[in-house]
Image: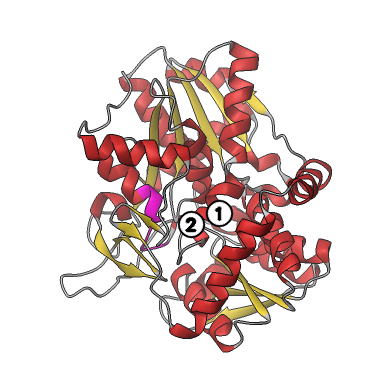
Amino acid sequence: MPVELIETPQNEDLLRRLIDGSLPDQFGRYGMFGGRFVPETLVPALERLEQGMREHMDTEDFREELRGQLHNWVGRPTPLSPAPRLGDAWGAEVWLKREDLAHTGAHKINNSIGQALLAKRLGVKRIVAETGAGQHGVASAAACARLGLPCRVYMGEIDIERQAPNVDRMRRLGTEVFTVTTGDRTLRAAIDEAIRDWVSDPKDTYYLLGSAIGPHPYPLLVQRLQAVIGEEARAQMLAVTGELPDIAVACVGGGSNAIGLFHPLLGDRSIQLLGIEAGGRGNALGEHSATLSHGTPGVLHGNYSMLLQDANGQVQETHSVSAGLDYPGVGPEHALLKTIGRVQYGVIGDDEALDALNECCRLEGILPALESAHALAGARRWARENPGKRILIGMSGRGDKDMPTLRTLPI
């Protein structure tokens, strides 16, 4: 059975407004979450971005340019692949939305090329970005090379070590990769440094944020650019099977891949939506990255959402075998969707994710990203509890980038 919305008039109204586009409100709020908590020096840049979105994103020439780049360069639409051997093993009908086959190897390129096109229209002189697993960094580097924009990517020292192939790819695409040695030396610290750079020159620098987090209007902007995933998947499921899936499953770190799959499906109440967070190696703070499952509300990187923080409000370090899920916050739309009950969120640990990765390799000939492996494991667990159902899984990226990590682990 699909998950039922927690039925109150307020929750029904919030879901309706999410679907019709009147959320976030004029203050960037998704109910109690979201907003804009930034230094005063960044307010004009954010207002300019918000105005630029209104002026450009709904015009036919911008949409045509974006469609052209997505089709001719990114390779959209990405396939919807049946996974019959996984289905046999799980007792389910399994379909994979293949973002791993998009140019640069993940869903991140949808957002990067869209924001880069918008930044160029805003007349900025340079791009800064952050990356954890490296896929957003590679996507930003590729998009900036495509459009002739100088780019600097901030990446934590720990992530640089475990995602070495992507570091080399970024540099070969002409991007400067800046090693972040402060803080937790992962994605959170990289975002901190990118924001510091942006604050120093908010007029001529554009911050190309990679996930559905940050101050308004970034969560909305990223959701709009990633919604192509769910829009395509919905149409493809109907074209191939004549029916919608019983459930759609995606991994959740900051949340761009999942919100891209989920948002276009929110109005299809027959579809259960399941987001999978990184359970790491335990339930204690510092042992996982399961923000929605174990977090509390607070402010991080410009928005109010769920965070992994201690009793004093100090944001804590996180852990996941997957660099792209290793973040102590989550996008405000996800926080709202959990609160009102439209989306369920579960937790998958490192070992279970690795087992699902190996199973997908052996049974389907597909090496998924470690991020995507969490979604596979979550879908497998759900399938065994709900046999015979049709499952749509967001295959957010491919696992080439994870080989330095995988080489150290048993097959």
On the rendered structure, is 262 left or right of 64? Answer: left
Question: Where 411 falls versus 300 (above or below)?
Answer: above
Q: Which residue lies furthest to the bottom in this view?
A: 200
Give the alpha-carbon distance from disc 1 to disc 2, as whole Å: 5 Å
For numbered disc 2, what is the local secondary structure? Answer: helix
What amino acid is at disc 2? Pro
Read off the residue under disc 1. 222
Read off the residue under disc 2. 219
Q: What span is in magenta?
A: 327-334
Q: Which of 186 and 406 is in front in this view?
A: 186
Location of residue 324 in the rendering, given as x and y in whole percent from the top left corner: 50, 57
For the point 17% across and 75% down, which residue is it?
Answer: 312
For the point 38% across and 73% down, which residue is it?
Answer: 37
Which secondary structure type mostly characterizes the magenta part of the structure? loop
Q: How crowded is mark 1: few (under 14 residues within 10 Å), some or many (20 or more)?
A: many
Location of residue 52 in the rendering, given as x and y in whole percent from the top left corner: 64, 63
Quadrant where the image shows the N terminus: top left
Question: Residue 202 appears in which quarter of the rendering?
Answer: bottom right
Q: Nearer the viewer, residue 238 or 347?
A: 238
On the rendered structure, is 198 left or right of 138? Answer: left
Question: Residue 299 appears in which quarter of the rendering?
Answer: bottom left
What amino acid is at disc 1? Val
Residue 107 in view, yes or no:
yes
On the rendered structure, is 218 left or right of 269? Answer: right
For the point 74% across and 60% down, which residue is it?
Answer: 117
For the point 41% across and 42% down, which residue is it?
Answer: 18
In magenta segment, residue 329:
yes
**Residues marked 1 and 2 touching at CB (< 8 Å):** yes
